[in-house]
């Protein structure tokens, strides 16, 4: 369908050789429209630019009073401690404004655009909340192109002209190194995620820079895994097999730290004495874990509230470039860190000779 200025339902109906009522019902998600017809109408609406113009008209004449969050496949676990806290904060603000939150899913990474397409074309939402931004995030480019309001929790590598709230995870990561060095640690490992995840990229760069400035950086002590407890466990098993194992672990999420602590316990090591572990996030399990986890708080509940407030401001016409905020992360010290009881040589010997005799001497 070629460009022809203002696109209306009449134009779409004529181009598709369908009744205007059929096109309207397809765009608004009525169940009496065949799926093949709905898909055909939605595709034509997107190609013609109708979706963006209809969103703009809708915002002028009255909103649908719903905002959306689309969770990629790897974030679908609704029991995720961070997600639960974040959504709680967001819904508290939205409910106070009479706004609903629609949580949608893209079960496979390649399906994300289909989900956004459907919600935009059928005008189900006034705007979107994005979470766990990527360094180069295609969702940001897509929503900017469609002229749909959105606020991201997290920046991208270029911090483009869009609304976002972020936590200063780089400063927290550098502070983690300084804290451990002050305790006496010199072999400090970093359990992280792929740098395609923007906060992981920022933290990796900050930790590397800080360790290099102290002449303590060892690339063999940087392990990249998935952001799960199992990832933390497998990375710790690998790190403890080093000829000079680390005496401290910096983990990019509390979930990674929980897995790391489990692995250390299985090796017969005392977390917080034999090996220190620091997390990031301060999820509800952190203070009741064994031992309680020292970590940096993102205050996910408050972050959700802030993002919702920013989205309301954006939808009301505030320019996105002035809706960009960086908040500090606060250190919450508990019991999972301390001065090293063993140097790397003694730690290696302990692993070889201890009750589990995990590794050969």
Image: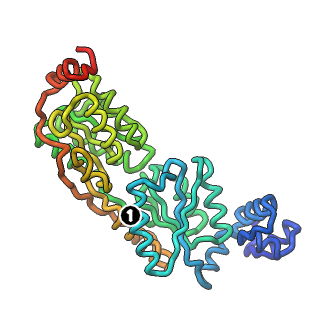
Q: In which quarter of the image is residue 224?
A: top left
For residue 72, above or below residue 148: above
- The percent coordinates of residue 194 (x first, y second) are 42, 41
| Location of the C terminus (image quadrant) | top left
Residue drawn at point x = 41 percent, y = 73 percent: 92
Observer-nearest residue: 262 or 178?
Answer: 262
Under tag 1, what secondary structure?
Answer: strand
Task: Tally the marks.
Answer: 1
Q: Residue at x 18, y 50 (%)?
A: 334
Q: In the rendered view, does 336 fall on the left or right side of 139?
A: left
Identify which residue is drawn at 20% across, 44% down: 336
Percent of width and height locating residue 290: 24, 44
Q: Where is residue 163 in the image (x, y as percent from the top left)?
A: 44, 66
Specify whether residue 266 is in view: yes
Foreground: 328 or 82? Answer: 82
Residue wearing tag 1: 165
Query: Does 276 appear above or below 123?
Result: above
Residue at the (75%, 68%) spot, across then down: 31
Residue closest to the far front: 355
Q: Which of 48 and 294 is in front in this view?
A: 294
Residue 25: x %, y % from top left: 77, 73
Q: Is residue 153 left or right of residue 16?
A: left
């Amino acid at each position: 369908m070629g460009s022809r200025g203002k696109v209306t339902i009449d134009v779409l109906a004529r181009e598709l050789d369908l009744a205007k009522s059929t096109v309207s019902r397809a765009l608004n998600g009525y169940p009496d429209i065949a799926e093949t017809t709905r898909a055909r109408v939605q595709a034509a609406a997107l190609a013609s630019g109708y979706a963006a113009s209809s969103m703009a008209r809708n915002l002028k004449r009255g909103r649908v009073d719903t905002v959306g969050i689309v969770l990629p496949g790897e974030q679908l676990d609704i029991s995720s401690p961070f997600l639960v806290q974040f959504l709680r904060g967001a819904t508290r603000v939205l409910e106070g404004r009479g706004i609903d939150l629609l949580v949608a899913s893209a079960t496979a990474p390649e399906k994300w655009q289909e989900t956004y397409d459907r919600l935009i074309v059928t005008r189900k939402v006034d705007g979107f909340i994005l979470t766990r931004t990527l360094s180069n995030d295609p969702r940001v480019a897509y929503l900017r192109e469609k002229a749909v309001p959105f606020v991201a929790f997290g920046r991208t590598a270029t911090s483009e002209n869009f609304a976002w709230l972020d936590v200063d995870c780089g400063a927290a990561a550098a502070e983690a190194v300084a804290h451990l060095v002050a305790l006496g640690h010199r072999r400090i490992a970093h359990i992280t995620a792929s740098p395609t995840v923007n906060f992981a990229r920022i933290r990796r760069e900050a930790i590397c820079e800080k360790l290099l400035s102290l002449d303590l950086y060892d690339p063999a002590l940087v392990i990249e895994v998935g952001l799960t407890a199992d990832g933390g466990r497998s990375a710790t098993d690998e790190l403890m097999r080093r000829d000079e194992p680390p005496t401290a672990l910096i983990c990019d999420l509390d979930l990674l730290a929980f897995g790391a602590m489990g692995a250390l316990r299985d090796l017969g090591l005392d977390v917080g004495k034999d090996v220190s572990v620091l997390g990031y996030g301060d999820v509800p399990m952190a203070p009741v874990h064994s031992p309680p986890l020292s970590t940096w708080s993102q205050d996910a509940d408050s972050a959700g509230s802030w993002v919702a407030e920013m989205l309301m401001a954006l939808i009301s016409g505030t320019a996105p470039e002035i809706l960009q905020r960086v908040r500090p992360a606060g250190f919450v010290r508990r019991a999972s860190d301390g001065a090293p009881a063993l140097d790397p040589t003694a730690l290696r010997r302990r692993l070889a000779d201890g009750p589990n005799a995990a590794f050969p001497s």
